[in-house]
Image: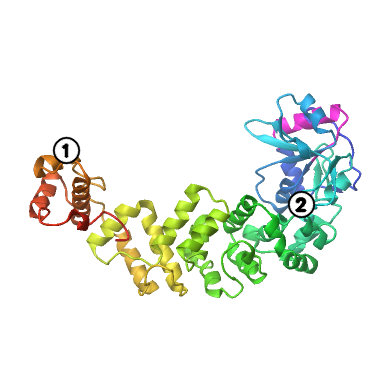
């Protein structure tokens, strides 16, 4: 990048500067031109600007940076004036969103905060020009670093880089005070333990004790915020170890039904190799497998999951403990009903049965080896000759049976659709042959088989 395009130094920080590590310098050299433009505009107006938060942490760890946030010394109203197309996304806390090329960059005015009386947010926010004070209010040392773009230096007053090298998560200042300010920091702490390919970090002793002593603080956190952090934890590469530690520390008891410290079998399921194929929502369903359906539903509602998320988890939970029969007919129906989730269901059953988990529904008598056999049979199942859609419609069926529109017609059509799939019928002529062999005129339509799984 040419020297002419690099921004002039903005306001200098009141924090000692350190040389940036080589990988950070390399990252800075590849910053989008819009970021350099933003830095130049702020410098021209006598302000300071620093990259802060997760972007600094992730670039130091060698992780791809997805979001870039800034701390600035200019007050929110001035930021809105010099960036007319910005958006006041959280202006009461000093945050405006600056437009980039298809992205937004959050810029937050340097600030100090009063006490967190409700355990959720500060009572008062005051604007400042001290980067030192701003970093002092942050939660963990790895999140309390800053990068001066123009000078290509770092500010790390709380030794976050050193903690990264040790694989240690440590609070800024007094751990008990930092955690008691905002209960959500408890979940954030456990989330930051998961370092992906780098494995799982540890808490320093002071932070570990503060987390256990303040677990009740989660009661003051909105359920939406809890769910957002919990889902991030469940999606983590090393979530099995992190969730097990949360159970041991009594954290899960704060927002999930039951007592979790002794749930060793449930924790063991999360380490199964199939679980790494699943997303966080599916992993959550595994943890809830032994809960009654009403407990699951209440937990999902309490955590404010979306209707789509609740339906997904409840559908999985409702099928736990069930298996198709080891026959072509049963396997075909199973595949037709569950579609893309059929293979997943068998893998989930292998996970549960491998660890002795007994879902509230289903006997689960078949062992994991039996289910592995069903999985092999499923993978070898040939495609149906005519696909999964019904070969006939209601008009076709009315012409041949004289049944008027209504429930009986619909149930007979569904029965024939099931037989079409079970027997792999090729065309409507074969369906008609089957229809002629059914005793539909002599039976109650409410007893006719449906196309469903489980039956």
Q: Secondary structure at mark 2?
A: helix
Q: What residue do we see at 54% from left, 59% from top?
A: 299
Instruction: Answer with left or right where residue 281 lies relative to residue 214.
Output: left
The magenta-colored residue range is: 31-50
Find residue 148 and report its horizontal and vertical position in percent. 82, 41
Report the predominant secondary structure element of the magenta stretch: helix
Q: Give residue 130's quadrant in the image.
A: top right
Tell me the element at label 1: helix
**Which residue carries the number 1 mark?**
395
Residue 394 showing in the rendered view: yes
Q: Which quarter of the rendering shows the N terminus?
A: top right
Badge 1, how many Cα within 10 Å: few under 14, some, many 20+? few
The quarter of the displayed image where residue 399 is located: top left
Decide whether residue 132 is among the magenta residues: no
User: In the rendered structure, which disc, 1 or 2, sits on the residue that comes first in sequence?
Assistant: 2
Residue 27 drawn at (x, y percent): 72, 43
Vertical order, 337 against 287 (above or below):
above
- Name the one closer to the observer, 106 or 396: 396
Q: Nearer the viewer, residue 14 or 353?
A: 353
- Determine whether, in the image, residue 372 is placed left or right of residue 16: left
- Label 1 close to label 2 by CB (< 8 Å): no
Q: Residue 176: which disc?
A: none
Q: Residue at x 43, y 64 (%)?
A: 348
Find disc 2 in the rendering and name its residue.
Answer: 143
Which residue sits at x=18%, y=46%?
A: 409
């Amino acid at each position: 990048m040419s020297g002419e395009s690099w921004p002039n130094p903005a306001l200098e920080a009141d924090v000692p500067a350190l040389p940036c590590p080589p990988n950070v310098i390399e990252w800075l050299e590849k910053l989008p031109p819009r970021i350099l433009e933003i830095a130049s505009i702020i410098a021209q107006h006598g302000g300071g600007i620093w990259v802060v938060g997760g972007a600094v942490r992730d670039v130091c760890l060698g992780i791809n940076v997805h979001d870039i946030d800034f701390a600035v010394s200019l007050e929110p109203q001035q930021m809105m004036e010099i960036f007319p197309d910005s958006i006041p996304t959280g202006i009461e806390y000093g945050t405006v969103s600056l437009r980039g090329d298809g992205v937004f960059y959050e810029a937050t005015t340097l600030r100090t905060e009063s006490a967190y009386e409700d355990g959720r947010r500060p009572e008062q926010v005051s604007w400042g020009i001290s980067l030192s004070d701003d970093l002092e209010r942050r939660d963990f040392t790895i999140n309390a670093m800053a990068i001066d773009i123009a000078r290509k230096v770092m500010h790390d007053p709380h030794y976050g880089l050193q903690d990264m090298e040790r694989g240690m998560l440590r609070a800024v200042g007094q751990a008990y005070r930092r955690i008691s300010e905002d209960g959500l920091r408890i979940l954030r702490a456990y989330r930051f333990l998961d370092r992906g390919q780098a494995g799982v970090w540890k808490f320093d002793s002071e932070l570990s004790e503060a987390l256990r002593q303040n677990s009740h603080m989660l009661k003051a956190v909105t359920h939406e915020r809890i769910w957002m952090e919990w889902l991030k934890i469940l999606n983590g590469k090393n979530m099995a170890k992190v969730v097990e530690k949360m159970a041991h520390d009594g954290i899960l008891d704060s927002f999930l039904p039951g007592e979790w410290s002794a749930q060793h079998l449930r924790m063991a399921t999360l380490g199964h190799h199939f679980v790494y194929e699943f997303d966080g929502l599916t992993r959550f369903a595994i943890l809830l497998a032994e809960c009654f359906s009403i407990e699951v539903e209440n937990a999902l509602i309490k955590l404010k999951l979306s209707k789509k998320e609740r339906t997904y988890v409840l559908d999985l939970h409702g099928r736990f403990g069930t298996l198709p029969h080891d026959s072509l007919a049963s396997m075909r129906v199973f595949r037709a009903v569950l579609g893309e989730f059929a293979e997943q269901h068998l893998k989930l059953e292998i996970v549960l049965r491998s660890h002795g988990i007994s879902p509230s529904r289903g006997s689960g008598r078949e062992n994991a080896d039996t289910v592995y056999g069903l999985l092999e049979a499923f993978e070898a199942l040939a495609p149906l000759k005519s696909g999964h859609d019904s070969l006939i419609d209601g008009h076709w069926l009315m012409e041949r049976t004289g049944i008027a529109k209504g429930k009986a017609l619909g149930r007979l059509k569904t029965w024939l659709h099931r037989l079409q799939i079970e027997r792999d019928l090729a065309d409507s002529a074969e369906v008609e042959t089957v229809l002629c062999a059914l005793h539909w005129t002599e039976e109650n339509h409410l007893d006719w088989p449906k196309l469903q799984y489980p039956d």
